Image (tube, grey):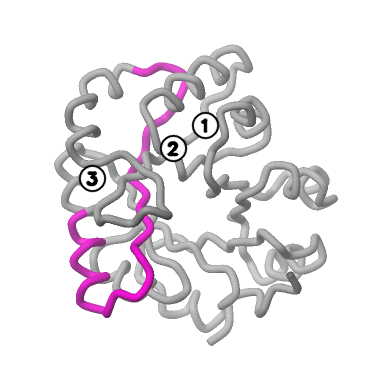
Amino acid sequence: MDYLEIKKILPKGVNLLAVSKGFQSSDIEYIQSLGQIDFGESKVQEAILKPVFHSNNNLNWHFIGRIQTNKIRKIVENFDFIHSVDSYKKLLKISQVAIELQKMPKVFIQIKLAHDPGKAGLLYSELIANWDQIKQIKGILLIGLMTINPKGLNAEQNFQLFNKCRLIADKLELPHCSMGMSNDWEEAIKAGSTWIRLGSLIFGKRDS
């Protein structure tokens, strides 16, 4: 399945984020020529070295990687969307930097819904305990939740976790869920994802 086939079958209200980490400017420009404007990167340094990152103002850049506190200024400076905010402290730091820079990044809180030592994210209990304070944070536009499922789940297990994320977002009156990648995006859409993050399915295999 290629980019155009995927775009054709996406339901209304589901946005495709083309994960361009590990791909060249020319690859990004080619996918853009097919109509794509949203691209995801997970390493600040790699992203800002790509000529297309600075030369093309028509693109929306999404940060989807693990956030290091010392990189927050660069992330806020360079990205329109931040999908992977995995702690209350980082939300506050992003807010502080965004106010300084007079920017308003669109932010997803990363939530962890299953035991997975390799994945970051707020637990549901932490999110709810801090929700009243989180809602008051200035300088950011909080638009949704993001989650990454553990590897090795079957379709039904993937669906159940994504569905849980959607129900929490609805409860908190957040419109968006960033969930679903190359191996589980169809279950994510069934569960109510509004942003699916696809890399190799769109660009082909990475060199590295």
In the image, taking residue 117 as reference, residue 113 lies left or right, namely left
Q: Secondary structure at mark 2?
A: strand
The kind of residue tagged 2 is Val
Asked whether the residues under the numbered discs 3 and 2 touch, taking CB atoms below 8 Å apart as contact, a structural biologist would say no
Question: Which residue is found at the position 47% from the left and 73% from the top?
Answer: 182
Q: Is residue 155 magenta?
A: yes
Residue 172 in the image: x percent, y percent? Answer: 19, 37
The kind of residue tagged 3 is Ala
Closer to the eye: label 3 or 2: 2
In the image, taking residue 22 as reference, residue 80 lies left or right, namely left
Question: Which residue is found at the position 73% from the left and 48% from the top?
Answer: 47
Residue 86 in the image: x percent, y percent? Answer: 40, 38
Location of the C terminus by quadrant is bottom right
Residue toward you, 174 or 91? 91
Within 10 Å of the Cα at label 3, are there few (<14), some (14-19), or many (20+) other Cα atoms? some
Residue assigned mark 2 = 85
Q: Which mark is residue 44?
A: none
The kind of residue tagged 1 is Pro
Residue 158 picture quarter = bottom left
Spatial CA span between label 1 and label 2: 12 Å
Residue assigned mark 1 = 105
Residue toward you, 21 or 154? 154
In the image, taking residue 166 as reference, residue 66 lies left or right, namely right
Asked whether the residues under the numbered discs 1 and 2 touch, taking CB atoms below 8 Å apart as contact, a structural biologist would say no
Residue assigned mark 3 = 169
Question: Which residue is found at the position 62% from the left and 34% from the top?
Answer: 75
For the magenta stretch, what is the residue range?
137-164
**N-terminal label among 3 and 1:** 1
Spatial CA span between label 3 and label 2: 15 Å
Question: Which residue is found at the position 25% from the left and 61% from the top?
Answer: 162
Q: Secondary structure at mark 3?
A: helix
Q: Residue furthest bottom?
A: 1
